[in-house]
Amino acid sequence: MVSDTGRYPVSDALRVVDGETIYRTDDWWKALVSYQYEDRQDSDSVNRAVYLWHNDDGEWKRKQKYLVRSRDTWITDREYIEEFLSTDSGDPASYDFDESSLPVSDYLTVGDAATVFKTEDWWKAVVRIDGKGDWTTREVVVYVWQASEGEWRRRQKYGIKSQSDWEEEAEIISKYLEEQSTPEESESTFDPDKAKEEIQRKLRRQHLGETLE
């Protein structure tokens, strides 16, 4: 882990408060960044997001951004990711959901998916990708889409390419959030074990977007 406070290639509209580099190579840079908006520095509100940048001819350009709203929402997303990384859900032909309803590229082969939440304006889902074109893969992606002009447009994306990468990454993010937790998060009554049980029950239904009873 490397702290690069103030040097992360984020928008000029943001002021970096803190951060942790998850990994960095000559071509790729992934980090968890805490930031405030420059025009709202009088507020105590701090946002956190996982960024992925690619080095394009010496300039770091953002490829992915995933907001970590709270420690509780991170735990929920983490449970979905771990379920999809560690289990096979069977034959996609037997699923109850229609893959074409997911606003992802036709280039991707969806192996499984589950909605975290969906409103008229926002949709968050965790998707297992089993193929890219003719290439077989096993990746898990968290998407957030926003409804705009009758279409779902991607606003956030967070991809995990392997179990080994995920274990190290999840540990870094979880530890960081624990150390930076707010008083409200420390007093949260959120039960991770119950959340995991509910998620496992939901995924057994194999129905994208179905609400739990």
Image (cartoon, grey):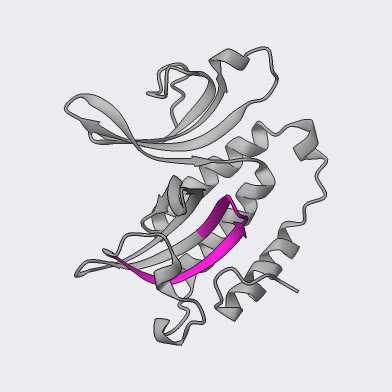
Direction front: furthest residue: 149
Q: Position of residue 150 (x, y in %)?
A: 47, 53
Q: Position of residue 134 (x, y in %)?
A: 19, 70
Above or below for 23 versus 73: above
Say if the magenta span includes residue 118. yes
Residue at the location (79% across, 35% down)?
184
Q: Position of residue 137 (x, y in %)?
A: 29, 66
Q: Is residue 179 left or right of residue 26?
A: right
**Quadrant containing the N terminus in the rendered view:** top left
Q: Main secondary structure of the magenta part?
A: strand
Q: Is residue 190 left or right of residue 63?
A: right
Above or below for 92 versus 141: below
Q: Position of residue 177 (x, y in %)?
A: 62, 37
**Quadrant containing the C terminus in the rendered view:** bottom right
Q: Is residue 134 left or right of residue 30?
A: left
Residue closer to the observer: 191 or 113: 113
Above or below for 183 versus 69: above
Residue at the location (62% across, 13% down)?
41
Tell how many labels. Answer: 0
Residue at the location (71% across, 57% down)?
192
Magenta span: 108-125
Direction left: furthest residue: 57
Residue closer to the observer: 200 or 66: 66
Residue closer to the observer: 150 or 181: 150
Q: Find residue 194 and report its image quarter.
A: bottom right
Residue at the location (54% across, 14% down)?
38
